[in-house]
Amino acid sequence: MRAFTTALPALDMFPIAQWSRQTAKHWRGKRDVVLGYGDATGYPPLRRAIAAHLRATHGIACDDGQIFIVNGAQQAFHLIGSVLLQPGDKVWFENPGAIGARNALLAARAELVPLPVDRDGLVVAHGQRVAPDFRMAFVTPSHQQPLGVTMSLTRRFQLLAAAEAAGAWIIEDDYDGEFHYGGHPQPALKSVDRAERVLYVGTFSKTLFPALRLGYFLAPASLVDTFEAVFRSYLPGMPSNPQAIVAGFMDEGHFATHLRRMRRTYMERHRVLIEASRRHLSGLLDVEEADTGLHTIGHLRADLPEAEVTRRAEHRKVTVAPIQRFCLTPVLLNALVLGFSGIKPAEIEAGAATLARLLEDMASEPGRLAEGGAWCRLTTSWSAPARPARRSPVG
């Protein structure tokens, strides 16, 4: 839990006492429910609670029979890929993109087709040029992982139209879209999916805490019977007790209250990061303001290579992630991913100061470019260089 670790919720703010009361209440329930085998597809009250939440807050028309409970989003990606893809099927994949999903789909023996991302999200036109026969697309439209852009409504409709024309499926990973800080958030891609091509994946790792290992996906109606057969045939299902506790937490309104509290907390921590970066990192690291999610990115000067900065920061007990770590093919960016959600304000301030000293030391080394060197920024029309897709996980 040090600056600037990504993908962590504010564990220091979690309502442990409230959770403990909910846990105790569950364990006082009927023994056949508490101690018996659960439903392989998921604890029914939790499936109902998730469906109600998606209808009320994301505009997604669904019923609880379309919800399947899994061991985190990673299992959802692997399961969807294993069921819907044949070896060698082409999958449009954001580049840079989510590492866990990338590795899960590679494990399903898919051929990942890296597509560039611009300010409107995945560049659909590029995918139609290089792989019109795609079988699946993976996207993070609410808060692109890792660049943080929100897919425009126009681009969403382009993607849906392309999938319908190709008979392809779309995985929508809404890993931290619950946390929106300003203006009106875009509707979920699934909410405007009239052709029923989108599988919506969510997780409680960011909204509650990672140790739950609890996620879910929403299947189109045409796939419900298929996934039910898969779950009931060879998947044992998730433990029912944590599912029941989460269901009670949601049904009693604690989940909605917790989300509101966390939005305020993350908004404040994001503000602290932006202000600290202006004080300490000006001219060294250009940190983008975010309006959604748990992280943002900072653009480095060209003379401060991201991989070297990452290695040296680790020695000073500051954690950052280079953009290239998320890439299937190289992109024209020199940037770091900075998490702020799980970091207390004082630690964000201290981390920014430490990172500034590191970058100043590097910038002053002989052979570096003069201060004010070039920046590598996200453009609106960049295309990945031609290169065969990598067929093995990269870290």
Image: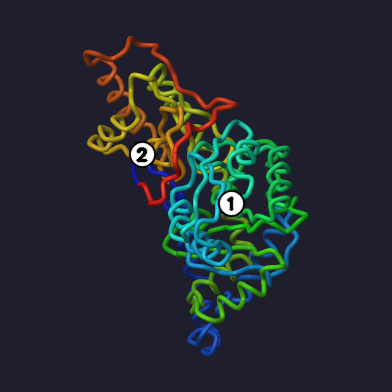
Quadrant in which residue 344 is drawn: top left
Which residue sits furthest top? 370
Which residue is the site of mark 1?
A: 174
Q: Quadrant of residue 264?
A: top right
Q: In percent of the image, x 72 and y 52: which residue is there?
A: 164
- Residue 18 visible to an observer of this rendering: no
Above-or-below relation of 183 to 202? above
For the point 44% across and 37% down, which residue is it?
387
Kind of residue at disc 2: Ala
Task: Report the front residue among 267 and 168.
Answer: 168
Q: Considering depth in this image, is 247 or 160 the residue closer to the camera?
A: 160
Q: Secondary structure at mark 2?
A: loop
**Earlier-in-chain disc, 2 versus 1:** 2
Gap in angstroms between the C-alphas marked 2 and 1: 24 Å
**Residue at horizontal 69 percent and vertical 38 percent from the top:** 155
Q: Residue furthest bottom?
A: 32
**Disc 1 residue type (three-letter):** Asp
Q: Residue at x 52, y 27 (%)?
A: 378
Residue 356 is left or right of residue 125, and the answer is left
How many other residues sit within 10 Å of disc 1, few (<14), some (14-19) or many (≥20)? many
Tell us which disc is closer to us: 2 or 1. Answer: 1
Q: Which residue is mark 2?
A: 3
